[in-house]
Image: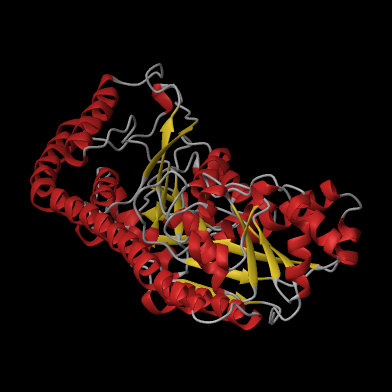
Amino acid sequence: MTDQQQLLRDRGICVIIPTYNNAGTIADVVQRSLLQCSDVIVVCDGCTDNTLEILNGLKERPCIVELKKNSGKGAALKAGFRYALEKGFAYAITLDGDAQHYPEDIPVLLAANQKHPGALIVGERKGLDAADRSSGSKFANSFSNFWFALQTGRYLKDTQTGYRLYPLKKLRGLDLLTSRYEAELELMVFASWHGVELVNEQVNVFYPPREERVSHFRPGRDFLRISVLNSVLCVLALIYGLPLAIIRNTLAFLRTIYSLLFFIITSMFVMTPIIYIYLSIGKITEQKKYNLHRIIQFMAKFVLIRHKIPGIRYTQANNAGEDFSRPAVIICNHQSHLDLVPLLAVSEKIIVLTADWVWNNPVYKYAIRNAEFLPASSGVDNILPQLKSLVERGYSIAVYPEGTRSPDCTIGRFHQGAFYLAQTLDIDVLPLVLYGSGRALPKKGRLLRKWPIHMEIDPRLSPEALRQKGETLREQASYMRQYYKDRYAQLANRFEQNV
């Protein structure tokens, strides 16, 4: 199994090929698809030629779903989707059995799925305007594009393409799905109404000479049926699709406002007064400082676990049974404003090197300054004496090696500061791997999305173990970045099957 085939399986992606009397091309399409993806499902839609015999005779056979009677592409897709769901797949790439689509473009849809998990990826055919197509085919695509835009408020250049990646667990309207090829348009309309992201990705297309093409499109009857369907969908757009969008956007806005107000009120009018009163009574002792950290950890846990941010389910795994009893340089990937909360929740003995906007934030600067958090902009060498003192008192130092939030959840370049600290202070590096915060609240996002957030506490690396990974600080930073890329991909493959 190739790396790509394994990645497709890890992400729960299969390929579904509906076919009706494509005996001349089906073997080639299936064999090329199997080279790209190990999990190929062919739906034989009541074939009357020798398609089924050809498939059964292949050396490497796909899974075959047989419909005894020709029921149309919609029915074939429905059967394929249900079979894929029964087998535990989360996504399905669909392509036609007539060799119009290139299985070699499967990596394009895979990359789009990694970048836009949970989205419906639409394979926009390259050079569609210049292709040798009938006037009926050109009109059908323009006709479909117009109605789709009218029904959803979204414009797609190629709504007739059959090359797509579907998020199976988000499909709606399967029971209402029309049986013929217009079902593909219907699936996109229902997906759009239910807030599924639609993403265009360009793919190649092959149009054989007209005399060699196999088409089951019946212009008069099929255009009539499509017109009736679009009329029905336009009515549903007003009484179903539009209200759904309004409700969904309103809930997202209220969820964001509620979380923001809860954070501000809790920080300014609960946490800050409690800390101020506590520190004002008597002398500030070491025990008081430790108790301050316990208060901060309690609030972080309360927000994540007890209060629960609406729409966000937080989980945590401690893979090595870490108890934070020994100081370390804690590193974590950085994606969102939400990242600090799960970091503070893992232990009460953490000092965070913060960005200036955090250090100067009026909402919680009183708490973090009294908790001895330090601004990273001061420079490691300037704050090193304070860090040494904190380590001697049993505190770990938390650093985001990327320095800034990732805009698209990819792991950015790691700076060397964290590894310089570990080397200078002669303490371990402790990796925390965070997934989901950048999806729930992206760097440039304004509204909270429903998304799981997961933190994994990985085994420590001693100074000696880290030197074995790289002699120089640059090599160590490069090694740890690749480590995070691999670990984050593992978490993404697991969680993005259920988003």
Q: Quadrant of the C terminus?
A: bottom left
Image colouring: secondary structure
Q: Residue at x 82, y 46 (%)?
A: 474
- Front one among 29 and 158: 158
Residue 405 drawn at (x, y percent): 55, 48
**Left or right of 248 on screen, residue 269:** right
For the residue pair 339 and 372, the one nearer the viewer reads as: 372
Where residue 170 sits, quadrant-wise, is: bottom left
Q: Nearer the viewer, residue 146 or 116?
A: 116
Q: Does 440 sit above or below residue 162?
A: below
Query: Residue 362: image x %, image y %?
Result: 43, 55
455 horizontally vs 178: left or right? right
Residue 402 appearing in the image? no
Direction from residue 475 to residue 230 in the image, left or right: left
Rendered residue at 37%/68% (across/down)? 309
Q: Is residue 213 visible?
A: yes
Give the left or right position of residue 183, taking residue 457 as reference.
left
Q: Position of residue 235 (x, y in %)?
A: 7, 46
Total tally of numbered discs in the picture: 0
Give the answer, above or below, for where 116 lies relative to 331. above
**Residue lying at 54% horizontally and 82% vertically, measured from the top left:** 282
- Quarter location, residue 75: bottom left
Residue placed most toward the observer, 27 or 359 = 359
Residue at screen point 91% across, 65% down: 464
